[in-house]
Image (cartoon, rainbow, N blue to C red):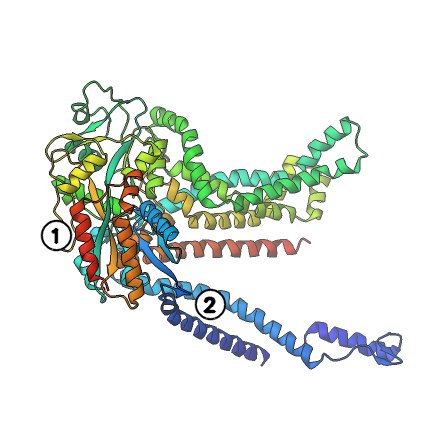
Amino acid sequence: MRTSRKLTVGLLLFLICAGLAVLGARLGPRAASGVAFAQDGQMTLQGTGATFPAPLYQRWFSEYNKLHPDVQIDYQALGSGAGIKQFQQGLVNFGASDAAMTDAEMAAVKRGVVLLPMTAGSIVLTYNLPDVSGDLKLSRAAYTGIFLGKITKWDDPAIAKDNPGVKLPDTKITVVTRSDGSGTTFVFTSHLSAISEDWKKGPGAGKSVNFPVGVAGKGNPGVTALIKQTPGAIGYVEYGYAKQTGMPMAVLENKSGKFVKADLETGKNALASVQLPPNLRAWISDPAGPDAYPIVTYTWLLCYKKYDDPKIANTLKAVILYGLGPGQSSSVELGYIPLPDNVVSAVKKALSQIS
Amino acid sequence: MPPEAQATGDILSKGVEGSTLFLATASGEITRPPTTRERLSNRLFRGCTQTFAWLTVLLVILIVVRIGRVALPALHTYGVPFLINTTWDANRAQFGILPAIVGTLYSSILGLIIGTVFGLAIAVFLSEGFLALGLDTVIRTAGLDNSPFLAALPNRIEDLLKVTIELLAAIPSVVYGLWGIFVVIPMVRPMADWLHSHLGWIPLFGTNLSGPGLFPAAIVLAIMVLPTVSTISRDALAAVPPKMREAAFGIGATRWEAILAIFIPTAATGIFGAIILGFGRALGETMALAMLAGNANVISWSLFSPCNTLAALLANHFPEAGTAEVGALMYAALVLLGITLLVNIIGTVILDRAEAGLRGLR
C-alpha cells in the first residue's frame, strides 16, 4: 500500500519534471534569440564565425568601442561553420566565414544575405627542419605529393631538385593537418584540388577532409605546437600566425612556375588577379599573376539584408565602414592583406543593400 | 510497523509498566507529537530531496533521448557498417568509426595498465604503513622517539601524499595535453626511436613516433586515472578487516606474504572496481587525447602510431559539422555513451559485490 503511494508520488514528480523540461526546451531557443540589447542608448551587437580573421575583427571592434563607447560588439570566434549555422538560425546580428556561404546556405536565410569581404590572408606551409637554413622551395608537384603521402622523405628528388645547395636530411616527413573543421583547411584543400587532379579525385576540398597521411592538431596553435615538437614535420597555418610565432615558411611555386614567398606584396598580387563578381564571392583557388602567392583567400562578414531594427542595421554599417576605412591599416600589422581599393568601393556599395 | 519502531514501542510499554523510566514526568510528557509546521517542513524537505534525486535520473534520460533522437536518422542510414568502416569523410558522407573505437579502447587499456601498476603500488604504500616503518627507524636512531610531533609525522605525510595524488584529478585536462606535447613527447622520442630501429620487427614498435601518438597519449592517460585507481584501491586495502591482518601476522606470515597473498586478494574485488572506474574515466577523456593522440584514422598495433578516439573525434568535428555529419557524430556519441555506461555499471556492480563480500568478515 505505502510503496504504491510512494511510487505514485515519484511518478507524479517525474512527470512534472519531464513537463518542465520539455517546456524549458520549447522556450529555450526563442529566449536566446533576443540579440542586440539596446538600453539607455547602449547597443550590443553579436557576431560569431571564423577564427582566421578574429584577431583583426577583435582589434576593430575594441577600437570602434573606444571611439563610440555606446556601441559594444561581441565577436565569438567559433569557426566558419558555427558562424554560418548561427547566422542562419538568426542567433546573431552578423556572421563571419572564410568560405563565404554556398547558394544553398544563403537560400535558407529568409531575411536575405549580403556577403562582404572584409580582409584577406595567405596560408603558408611551415616546417621543422632544424638543419636547413634559408628558404625551402617547394614545387607544386612536391607539396601535393607530400600531402598525398607520395613523398615521404625530405631528401626525395622531387624536393631536392628545386633546392640545390640545401642539404636535405633523410628524415621522414610528418604531415600535420587540422583536426577540427576550419576555413583554413577549406582554402588549402581548394587550392590543392585546383592544382592536382589526384587531390581532387582523392581527398577533395572541404572544411575537413580525409587526409591520406599525417597527424592532426586542433586549431592553428595545435598545428604549430605539433610542428615545433616534431622534427621533419610540415603543415599549413595562416600567414599571420606563422609570422607571429616565427615559424619558417616554404617558398611555393605558383601558377606561372615562379617560386614566391608569402608576404604582403605577393598576397596583394594574388588579390589583384581576381575580379570579384557582383555578389562579392570569389574563391581564389589558384591566382594567375606572375608574382602572386598561390594560397590566398578573402574572408567574409555575413549580414542580413533586412534587420528588424533600423538602428541595428545602421550601427552595423557604421562598424563595417570603420573596418573598411581606418581598420584596413591594422590588417598589415596583424599579417593580413588589406583589400584593394576597387574591392573597398564595391563593398561600400554593397552596404546599401542592408536596411 | 517497521522492526525498530516495534522495539521502541516494547521498551516504552515496559518502561511504563515498571515505572522506572524518566519519560513521564510530573509536569506531563516531555515527548510531544510534531507540530503541523514541523511535519510540513519535513515533508517539504523530503519532497525536495526526492525531486532532485529524480531530476538527475531525468537528466541522464533526457541526454540519451536527445542524442538518440538526433542520431536516429544516421542510425538508419549508416547502420552497422558505421561501426566497422574506417573512413570519416564528411564531404562524401562516408562515416565509419572503427579506428576511433579501436583507438579509444587501445589507449584506455594501455593507460590503465600503466596507471594500475603505479596506482596499486601507491595504494599499498599508503595503506600498509611503510612510511611509518621507515620514519620510525630514523626517529628511533636519532633518539627522538618521545616527541609527539614526530610520532604523528608519518600519518601527516601519508595524508599529504593522499591529498597530492587526489589533486592530480583536479588538473584541467587541457593542461595535461599541453604538458604531453611539450614534455612527454620529447621525453619518449629517443626511446621510441631506439625501439623502432632495433626492434621494429615487433608489431608493437612497427612505426616510428611522429610526435603525437598512442604511447604519449597512454602515458598521460595513466597519470589521469592514477587518482581514481590509487584512492579507491587504498580504501579497499584499508577496509581489509583487522582480524584478518592480525591472523595473517599471527600465523607467521612476513609483511610481503601478508600483502601479496592475503591483503591484496581480499581487497581484489575493490581494486578491480577501482580499475573499472578508472577505465570509465579514460574512455571519456577528451581534450588531452585530442591534443596527443594525433587524430588520424589509423588502426595499427604500433604503440607509436597516431590514433583517434571517439571523444576526440566528437570534439574535433562537432563545431563545424553540417546536418549529416552531426547525425553521424551523435551516433558516435551514442556508441561512446554505451561503452562508458557498460564499463561503469560493471565497475559499480563489482564494487558492490566487494563490499558485500567483506561484510561477513567484520
Chain letter belonging to callout 2: B
* Numbered label tally: 2
Mark seen at residue A333: none
The residue labelled by disc 2 is B58
Q: Position of residue B236 (x, y in %)?
A: 61, 48
Please state the chain letter of the residue tagged with numbered disc 1 in the rendered image.
A
Is A110 on the left or on the right of B122, as rendered?
left
Give x and y (percent) for residue B291.
Answer: 38, 42
Q: In which quarter of the view is residue A233 placed?
A: top left
Asked which quadrant contains residue A310, the reply is bottom left
Label 1 residue SS = loop
- Given the image, on which type of amino acid does mark 2 rest? Leu
Query: Quick check: marks 1 and 2 in contact, CB under 8 Å?
Result: no
Q: Looking at numbered disc 1 in the image, what kind of residue is underneath it?
A: Pro
Position of A163 relative to A261 (above/below): above
Question: 10 Å neighbourhood of mark 2: few (<14), some, or many (≥20)?
Answer: some
B160 relative position to A269: left or right = right
Percent from the top left, x then y, of residue B14?
83, 77
Measuring 72% from the left and 43% from the top, which residue is drawn there? B246
Give the farthest residue toward the top: A165
Place of residue B121 in the rendered image (x, y in percent of width and height, measured from the top left): 57, 38
Gap in Å between the C-alphas at discs 1 and 2? 53 Å
Label 1, residues with CA under 10 Å away: few <14, some 14-19, many ≥20: few
Residue linked to disc 1: A277
Q: Quadrant of the C terminus of chain A?
A: bottom left
Q: Residue at x 16, y 29 (%)?
A: A259
